[in-house]
Amino acid sequence: MVRRTISLTKAFAGLAGLFLTGTAAAEPLVGPWPTPSPTPVLLLGTPHLSGMEKLQPEWLDPLLDQLAAWKPGVITIEAPSGPECFLLRRYEKSWPDTAQSYCARVEAISALAGKALGLDMPAAEAAAEEAVQKLGPASTAAERRRMGGLFAAAGNLGSAATQWLRLPVSERPAGDGVSPALATELDDLSKRRNENFLIAATLAARLGLERIYPTDSHLADRVQAEAPPGLGAAMREIWSGSPLPLADEARKGMQDIASAETLLAYYRFVNRDDVAGQRFDRIWARLSSPHRPVSTAGAMLAGGNPATFP
């Protein structure tokens, strides 16, 4: 049986991507693949909703309806996992400031949940992986509350929000390993203006999925700790330049968002092949310049994001 997957990951600067997939493995790594049932994958480019101050959550309903109709079996998001944050914090000299930049919220909520459960992050990760396998259609509200607490303690905030959203509002009090403070945090997460929660977790809960998967990785950021002289200036040069032909249209589309219809129109625009391709083509052309130091291209490929419209 082919299992569909959806994923949220960065598509361009200020944009993240939602990735949906199905199941199937095939070789070679470059298609076309000799398999009768390749895994369907949907990558959704999305603005970072935190920057859309006027956004009303209900404006996302038409988008969520279309994504739900696609029926993904797996949803991945652009977010660091608990285990990666655990590693980055303990190897801070090798990854200076990385944990502080990307893991502060994960660590704070994990510590809060872990205190209530009496588990550190690795123990919570192990307990969460065991407990999630036992969930099913007949799972009780108490079991889901505890599951939300375990995911939070494990640093998987998207899955914690998914479990919280699967509960009726009346079933979201403290209890079953969820302290009053953690219940408040989970309430806030479930409606936080962030694509990982308003789109991914909301969609997962609607579809009856138990979790979403954080797939962002900052391990390649280590190259920045070993950056050669001049890397910063070279990177600024790569990102600079005259506006792309579609940049004005993108900015206008963002400014015009004032309803579910205009928001859906913007999503259709940013997910056009030519919109994403234009920016990527420019970035990679600059990286491949014969005058570009190899170390600069390596840093961009390892830890960079060919993203924004200039």
Image (spheres, rainbow, N blue to C red):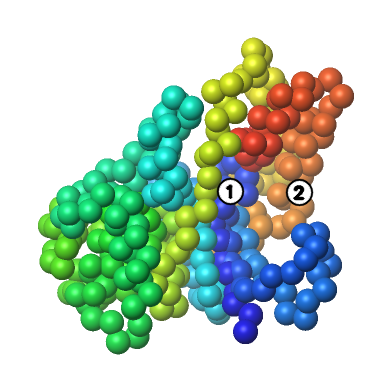
Mark 2 nearby-residue class (10 Å; few <14, some 14–19, many ≥20): few
Q: Nearer the viewer, residue 247 or 93?
A: 93
In the displayed structure, 74 sits above or below 107; it is below
Name the residue carrying label 1.
Answer: 10
Residue 55 horizontal side relative to residue 112, left or right: right
Helix, strand or loop at mark 1: loop
The image quadrant that residue 159 belongs to is bottom left
Of the numbered discs 2 and 1, the one sitting upstream in the chain is 1
Q: Are marks 2 and 1 in contact (CB under 8 Å)?
A: no
Query: Residue lying farthest bottom?
Result: 138
Give, as a three-letter code, the residue at label 2: Gly
Name the residue carrying label 2.
Answer: 277
- The reply to whether residue 188 is visible in this rendering is no
Of tags 2 and 1, the one toward the viewer is 1
Give, as a three-letter code, the residue at label 1: Lys
Residue at (62% x, 45% y) in the render: 12
User: What number is the disc on residue 185?
Assistant: none
Q: Nearer the viewer, residue 171 or 113?
A: 113
In the displayed structure, 279 sits above or below 56; it is above
x, y percent for residue 137? 34, 85
Q: CA distance from mark 2 to mark 1?
A: 14 Å
x, y percent for residue 256? 54, 51
